[in-house]
Amino acid sequence: MKKLLELKNIKKIYHDINSETLAIDNLNLEVYEGEFVAIVGPSGCGKSTLLSIICGLENKTEGNIIIHKNELKMGYMLQRDSLFPWLTIMDNCLLGLKIKGKIKQEDKLRIIKLLKKYDLEEFINHYPKSLSGGMRQRVALIRTLACNPDILLLDEPFSSLDYQTRLALSDDIYNIIKKEKKTTIMVTHDLAEAISMADRVVVLSCRPSTIKSQYIINLINKSTPFNNRKDIKFVSYYNLIWKDLDIHV
């Protein structure tokens, strides 16, 4: 596979009046085109901070981010759908492009095609209040896809949903990502979610965060996330990664 993104010796230090906190230290990571990478780690270890550094929302203190593609575009999907209630579903999907001032007719047609493709056609002119939580997250993903990003960054995309909806939506989101052939980096605290969706799971250490280990997920009959949880190798991966996290309550 072709290398798309490379993090080299990334360090992040937060400063306040009296002290400084080393959040990330000497972190190195490579991401390949078409790959789905899940990042897990103890609470507060800096998973979301790392995503913010990758997409430029936060500055790194040291290190390099190497891009292996000209004009690489990233799309960031937040924990909550953040849909504006006064905008229609179509206008919510167009929002990022409007902010950039780059809306073209082909963009509108692509969004309409995506909404139709993923069973949201009848809601194009509706408002977010008429959608279920899972449907809102699908709209949020389509909004992220509107700018046709090379890499999707997903920050706990299912954390605001109940368990049953999470299971169903993980299948939906996974299928959309695979059909649209998007390279994806997802941060999650849910190991089952990570193992069932990702090609590779990256385990971060406690703060200061660095990469502790990585697991290539080779399930026997890999299909949808829901079915992947039933795979005979799933529990083995879960136990290995859980032990690696070394979480003490």
Image (cartoon, helix red, strand yellow):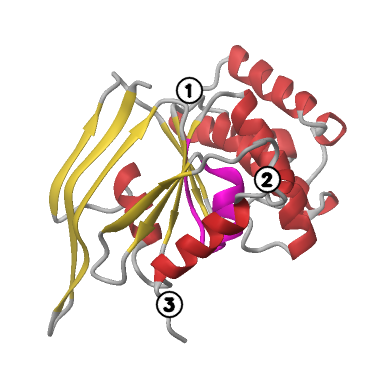
Farthest residue in the right direction? 122
The type of residue carrying mark 2 is Asn
Q: Quadrant of the N terminus?
A: top left
Q: Rounded to the nearest whole Å, what is the CA distance between mark 3 and mark 1?
A: 46 Å
Nearest the eye: 207 or 122: 207
What label sits on residue 228 in the rendered view?
A: 2
Q: Nearer the viewer, residue 161 or 238?
A: 238
Give the labeled residue for mark 1: 102
Q: Which residue is mark 3?
A: 247
- For residue 210, above or below residue 72: below
- Asked whether 218 or 47 is in front, the reply is 218
- Secondary structure found at label 3: loop
**Would residue 213 be visible to someone looking at this image?**
yes
Of the residues under marks 2 and 3, which one precedes in the sequence? 2
Q: What span is in magenta?
A: 184-198
- Residue 152 percent across, percent down from the top left: 48, 37
Task: Please state which amino acid type lies under the numbered disc 1.
Answer: Lys
Residue 190 magenta-drawn? yes
Q: Residues within 10 Å of mark 3 (few under 14, many from 20)?
A: few
